[in-house]
Image: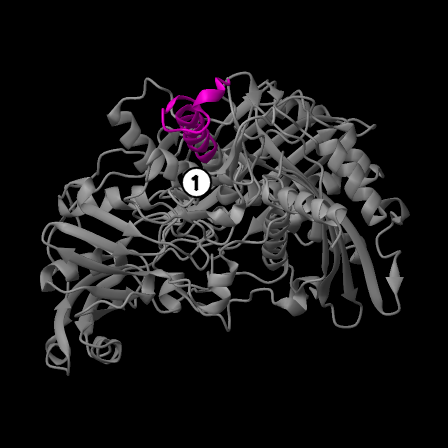
Amino acid sequence: MTVHDMKHAASDSARLEAVGGRLSRVDGPAKITGAAKYAFEQQLEGLVHAVLVGATIAAGKVTAIDTRAAETAPGVLAVLTPDTIMELKGASDWLGNPPSQPTYAPLVREVTFSGQHVAAVVAETFEQAVAAAALVKVWYDESPAIVDLSDGKAGDGIPIDAMTKEWGDAQAAFAAAPVRVCVAYNTPREFQAAMEPHGLIARWEGEELTIWEPSQWLDGMARTYAEWFGVPFENVRLVSPYIGGGFGSKALALAHSAVAAAAARMLGRPVKLVLNRPQNFTSYGGRAATRQTVAIGADSDGRIQSIVHRGVNETAVDGMWVEPLGSVTSIMYATPNFSSKQNVVRVNTVVPGAKRAPGENPSTFGIECAIDELAHELGIDPLEMRLINYAEQDPHAKKAWSTRQLREAFAAGAEAFGWAKRSPQPRSMRDGRQLIGWGMAAGTYPVRRAHGEAVVKLMADGSVEVESSSIDMGQGTYTILAQTAAETLGVPVEHVSVKLGDSHFARAGVTGGSRLAGVMTGAVYKAAGQALDELIGLALSDPRSPFQKLQANTLSVKDGRIASPRGEGPELSIAEFMSAVGRDQIEAKGDTLPASTTPEERYKNYTTIAMSIPHTEGDYSRHSWCAHFVEVRVDEDFGTVRVSRVVSALDSGRLYNPKLAESQWKGGIIMGIGQALLEEGIVDRRHGRIVNGNFADYMLPTNADIPDIQTISVGIPDPHSSALGGKGVGELAIVGIAPAIANAVFHATGKRIRDLPITLEKLIE
């Protein structure tokens, strides 16, 4: 290799390792070789196993539980019921609001949904616990259940005033508009269906509790455990170095978590409890089913005069979840008149929860399908319709966008897809017996911001350690934090070790809302900068430093070596310098909180979401944006739908690692394909049970369902959204895929499917 080649290779390596480089995931080798230890894989002395017993009715009361046969079964240590489990204290919610009840019962007498936990068996082995759980007999006084939104007993629901958004006179403007569409759209109950199930290992040592549990929010969950058991927050340690998928479902300590921790306390032994696959469909909430009506009035040129939106989502009988259906409807397009209102309907289900892009996802399905229907009514190209009504500022907040590269996304996506070749008439494009449809939709996701902290250590051997209680569930946290520290400190990325997933590390808030990358790169950048400043200050001032005699104002650190920027004097590796001055390490903690933050506010910031920063705070409205272009092929004889091509252009600001961002985008697109064509929680209307609560019957996309996916970044750095200019990545790409597919299916067949998923049966009705 020539000197030129060596310099070129070194330059390529530096670009790869720096923020913005396409470095492969640093945790990849550990996962490929099996060295990565997940929460359930801890081998603890004296470990015993718990198995839950779920209710077989959806509404009613437990009148009796016969545990005698289970208690005498081989290996059984305890059978827990509402009468025998230890009493737990109520815990505050994720906003920090005090509990509504002084006590918490993870095993219930009042049943509000099928599968709710009514008992648990603890035994020496998992097999013994499963066998004994089958021997527990439960009697009920059953009540009529409200199974879903279409149930006649459901009613119109409860108005959620906070969801009301209005300006102008939307009803009158709609009535006066020369062109109108008014259409209802429905999305079913959906589930996160992570490969790694929920569960935990709990161990008490005196008054100290250690929990190994897949977690998107270690500090928030630690707070809940501390409050349940009445111990100091510092006494609870959550450990979750790797997560096998969460998609919003693993951010809270739940009823099964409380059962395992209580059993461990009662027995004085570590307890392992892992939900079986059906229990993963009933022990926590997926995306709530939604129903929404979108009415749009426009003039004959396609300019929107009014949008009237009405939405409903299901929630639980004993809990509240709002799926904000007006979140995208109110900002995507310019209109002088707007009205959006929303109700929630109580049904007998587990409390719904966050699934990738909650609110934005179903909201976009409504507005982006309705825009397509309006474009067809007017004979205007769907892309042109969106450009005609492009919002130059946030229509709701009345603020400038921080950055909005949506026009650029439309242009880049359309060019790469070949949109100009689209024949506008439905059923006009075909390949033999296959009808070809081209559809598009836009999407957006707000920049959710918060504060985080990190510790960066420069070690005696020149290596760097980064510590944070933030987590990596596959999105690349280990990698981008290593890149941030390496670039800031001027060391090779292979010299950086990132330690995550331990609540005893520097604190971090919830990993959700596509905010972790922006928050934690900012914290690591600050901590690493402080460590660098201390290193250079030491080199300039310490009497033992070889650089002290230079009387220089500063020094440079590059490739792990310290030198004068003018090239004079010595050049030492960090390890050589640390040895010269007799230092074992340099440690710095950096956080993104204001300097005036009190200890109470710090605790609140990391253990609740109450201090999250609104995306419209200050002078700007901050969002990521995307435009999806989709081709479908519909078999004319069989009615089957296949997505054959996807081109998506996305604005996520500056990409900290394009390789990982593209992976996240493609993951979201794949989930959107599943949502559009496959996923649906099916309820047995007689008993309110989920009948497809398994991976055989809950249909998810496989490799055979996924075509070539092209993603294009059109983002520019957004200094108003994060310290390093990035915006949300993880949840953006799922937003808009389902309506793009639905619009493509209409273009192929001439038939509108407004209820997801789009199935053969609906096409041939």
Q: Main secondary structure of the magenta part?
A: helix
Side of 408 where 546 appears, left or right: left
Q: Secondary structure at mark 1?
A: helix
Side of 594 where 104 appears, left or right: left
Q: Position of residue 370 (x, y in %)?
A: 69, 41
Range drawn in magenta: 524-552
Residue that mark 1 sits on: 576
Q: Position of residue 604 (x, y in %)?
A: 29, 31
Q: Nearer the viewer, residue 649 or 343?
A: 649
On the question of residue 450 being in view, the answer is no
Q: Is residue 529 magenta?
A: yes
Q: Which residue sits at x=54%, y=27%? A: 569
Q: Which residue sits at x=53%, y=42%? A: 483
Q: Which residue sits at x=84%, y=53%? A: 426
**Three-letter amino acid code at the position of disc 1:** Glu
Q: Position of residue 595 (x, y in %)?
A: 35, 19
- Colouring used for the render: one colour
**Which corner quadrant holds the C terminus?**
bottom right
Q: Is residue 700 magenta?
A: no
Q: Position of residue 394 (x, y in %)?
A: 61, 23
Q: Nearer the viewer, residue 63 or 235?
A: 235
**Which corner quadrant holds the N terminus?**
bottom right
Q: Where on the picture, by quarter, is residue 462?
A: top left
